[in-house]
């Protein structure tokens, strides 16, 4: 059975690229550009990996991470960010995010948590 | 009772001392203080026995007992004196014992006679006298070239025990002049058979010698090897030779043009902005390297610093040793040593970045496979500084390249797909382009997966900061992140593989 990946990012282009590449690698990818809907989906269904952008309108990735992990402590969450020293990145890591992915993405880190 | 005992001992000591005084005052020649001491001891012993009321032992002759070592290379003897009027030990007794043990070689008759005399005269037991010794074989040593000690010194400065670096002591090169004495020929030394005390011959071995043969730019002169050219002396892989050195006595600029040389280069001036220097060997630059494009197969030593103005690119196959690196892109296969600071630069090493105690890394990115040691990382202003360790930066760069190409291909693919969607009768060419892009993305992804296996190189890589590390610094060890959120002093960052977290511990 294919492993399932959920990607939440307000940049459509980034979502499309990640979807295309991860699907090519054999994963089942679901994407959301709206952080509220993405979080809702993450809470409703089980995913092998959740990748969320950090800076999004309305809700940031640190909040999304906190909400997902408080409901599902064993979920694997990776953070997409342009700046690794962003204060929100630290907040997401403190909440239990596994790692930071530099935008647009870092394939090595994604594969780390899927293989 | 105890008082009586104490009195007895005091009396004994007093009596002994008086006896000793009598001997020295009387000038009696006793053949040495130890013999005098023995006589005294014997008298004390006799007195003690008398006081204890014990009778003297019955008469017995003196005897000799020999002990042969396991390897038949040494005979030791214990001499027991006669008692109660028994016969003294004589030489014949010893000869009989030696014959009995089959000893035919290496007997020290002086030691035997001396022990017999002392034992008989002083009536004392003498143990462990070496009376015969075999002869050890002597190794055969083949003819060899012995390199001068002064040329064999390793690069100084790095103290292995405490990992401190004395930058003033560090030297990378040993330069020699034409005709300078490099090594001497030591002729073959014949081996010699050994012999046990029982007369058995022991074969000799051939000494194992690490041969160093003279190579390029060396010549044999009598029993000496001398340099045939000015240059840099090197000993490696069983050979020693001299690299010819190209010296630039001023700056690398419009007077010299770009330089490409197969050996080592010494630049006494600076390498000016925009000039290219390529060396098949190593480079010493006695001033600064300014925004230059430089490729060396071996080491680079810059007495002052490397100033890149965000244009320079330096790629070295060995080590880099410099005072500072500023706005540069620097890459080395081996360790990078920096004395004062790295500012706004991209530094990559497949070994370690070693910096002096009061050094600073501020701004930029450091990719160091086996870790970093620095004085200070980041600044109070929160300047963004990224340190990545544990991974092979070349593999990481290949993965980056794959990612960039994938992003590019993915955006082209979405354009092509939009056009196909809009035009229900899309031509075969568009469909074929779409399929080819998909195929290529798949190919790149396969390559990325294969590279992943080689990415992690050293999970024990660490980041040691002897001074302060400031917020704004991001550390990653084997892709596990650590965001520095407050000032920390004197710490080591390391990877806890079980928890998959970067941990911080204070320096001892």
Image (cartoon, coloured by chain):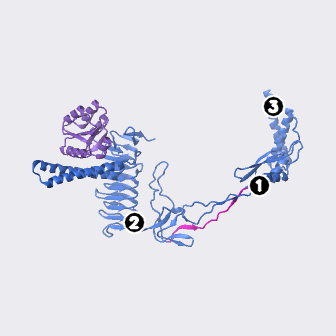
Chain colours: A purple, B blue
B136 to the left or right of A109? right
Closer to the N terminus: mark 1 or mark 2? 1
Closer to the N terminus: mark 3 or mark 1? 3
Mark 3 touches mark 1? (CB < 8 Å): no
Q: Where does the magenta region start and end?
A: B179-196
Q: Can you tell which of label 3 and label 2 is closer to the viewer?
A: 2
Give above or below for B82 relative to B188: above
Query: Which labelled disc corresponds to residue B103?
Result: 1
Closer to the N terminus: mark 3 or mark 2? 3
Q: Position of residue B46 (x, y in %)?
A: 85, 38
Query: Is B100 within the magenta?
Result: no
* Residue that appears at 40% across and 68% down: B247
Report the quarter where the N terminus of chain B lies: top right
Label 3: element kind? helix
Label 3 packing within 10 angstroms: few (<14), some (14-19), many (20+): few
Residue at the top extreme?
Answer: B1
Query: Which labelled disc corresponds to residue B50?
Result: none
Q: What residue did someone put label 2 on?
A: B265
**Both marks 3 and 2 on one chain:** yes
Give above or below for A81 relative to B240: above
Query: Which labelled disc corresponds to residue B7?
Result: 3
């Amino acid at each position: 059975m294919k492993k399932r990946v959920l990607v939440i990012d307000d940049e459509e282009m980034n979502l499309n690229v990640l979807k295309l590449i991860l699907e090519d690698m054999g994963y089942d990818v679901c994407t959301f550009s709206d952080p509220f809907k993405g979080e809702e989906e993450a809470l409703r269904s089980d995913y092998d990996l959740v990748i969320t952008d950090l800076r999004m309108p309305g809700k940031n990735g640190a909040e999304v991470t906190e909400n997902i992990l408080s409901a599902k402590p064993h979920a694997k969450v990776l953070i997409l960010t342009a700046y690794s020293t962003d204060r929100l990145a630290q907040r997401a890591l403190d909440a239990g995010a596994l790692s930071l992915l530099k935008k647009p993405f870092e394939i090595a880190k994604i594969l780390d948590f899927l293989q | 009772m105890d008082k009586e005992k104490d009195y007895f001992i005091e009396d004994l000591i007093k009596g002994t001392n008086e006896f000793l005084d009598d001997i020295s005052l009387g000038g009696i020649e006793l053949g040495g203080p130890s013999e005098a001491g023995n006589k005294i001891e014997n008298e004390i012993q006799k007195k003690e026995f008398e006081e204890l009321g014990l009778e003297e032992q019955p008469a017995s002759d003196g005897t000799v007992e020999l002990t042969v070592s396991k390897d038949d290379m040494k005979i030791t003897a214990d001499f027991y004196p006669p008692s109660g009027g028994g016969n003294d030990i004589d030489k014949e007794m010893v000869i009989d014992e030696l014959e009995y043990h089959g000893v035919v070689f290496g007997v020290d008759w002086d030691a035997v006679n001396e022990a017999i005399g002392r034992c008989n005269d002083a009536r004392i037991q003498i143990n462990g006298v070496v009376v015969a010794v075999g002869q050890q074989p002597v190794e055969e040593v083949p003819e060899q070239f012995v390199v001068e000690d002064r040329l064999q010194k390793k690069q100084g400065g790095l103290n292995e025990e405490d990992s401190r670096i004395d930058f003033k002591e560090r030297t990378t090169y040993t330069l020699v002049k034409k005709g300078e004495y490099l090594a001497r020929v030591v002729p073959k030394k014949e081996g010699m058979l050994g012999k046990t005390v029982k007369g058995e011959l022991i074969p000799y071995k051939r000494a194992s010698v690490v041969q160093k043969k003279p190579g390029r730019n060396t010549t044999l002169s009598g029993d000496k090897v001398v340099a045939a050219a000015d240059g840099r002396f090197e000993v490696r892989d069983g050979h020693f030779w001299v690299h010819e050195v190209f010296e630039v006595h001023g700056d690398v600029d419009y007077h010299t043009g770009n330089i490409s040389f197969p050996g080592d280069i010494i630049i006494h001036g600076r390498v000016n902005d925009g000039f290219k220097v390529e060396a098949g060997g190593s480079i010493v630059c006695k001033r600064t390297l300014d925004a230059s494009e430089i490729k060396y197969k071996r080491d680079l030593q810059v007495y002052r610093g490397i100033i890149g103005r965000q244009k320079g690119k330096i790629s070295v196959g060995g080590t880099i040793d410099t005072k500072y690196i500023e706005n540069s892109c620097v890459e080395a296969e081996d360790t990078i040593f920096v004395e004062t600071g790295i500012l706004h630069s991209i530094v990559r090493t497949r070994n370690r970045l070693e910096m002096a105690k009061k050094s600073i890394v501020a701004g930029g990115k450091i990719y160091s496979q086996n870790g970093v040691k620095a004085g200070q990382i980041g600044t109070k202003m929160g300047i963004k500084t990224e340190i990545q360790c544990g991974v092979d930066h070349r593999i990481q760069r290949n993965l980056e390249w794959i990612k960039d190409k994938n992003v590019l291909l993915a955006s082209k693919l979405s354009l092509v797909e939009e056009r196909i969607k809009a035009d229900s009768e899309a031509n075969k060419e568009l469909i074929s382009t779409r399929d080819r892009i998909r195929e290529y993305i798949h190919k790149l992804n396969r390559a990325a997966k294969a590279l992943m296996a080689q990415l992690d190189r050293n999970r024990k890589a660490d980041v040691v900061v002897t001074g302060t590390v400031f917020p704004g610094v991001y550390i990653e060890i084997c892709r596990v992140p650590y965001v520095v959120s407050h000032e920390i002093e004197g710490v080591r960052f390391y990877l806890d593989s079980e928890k998959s977290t970067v941990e911080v511990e204070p320096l001892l």
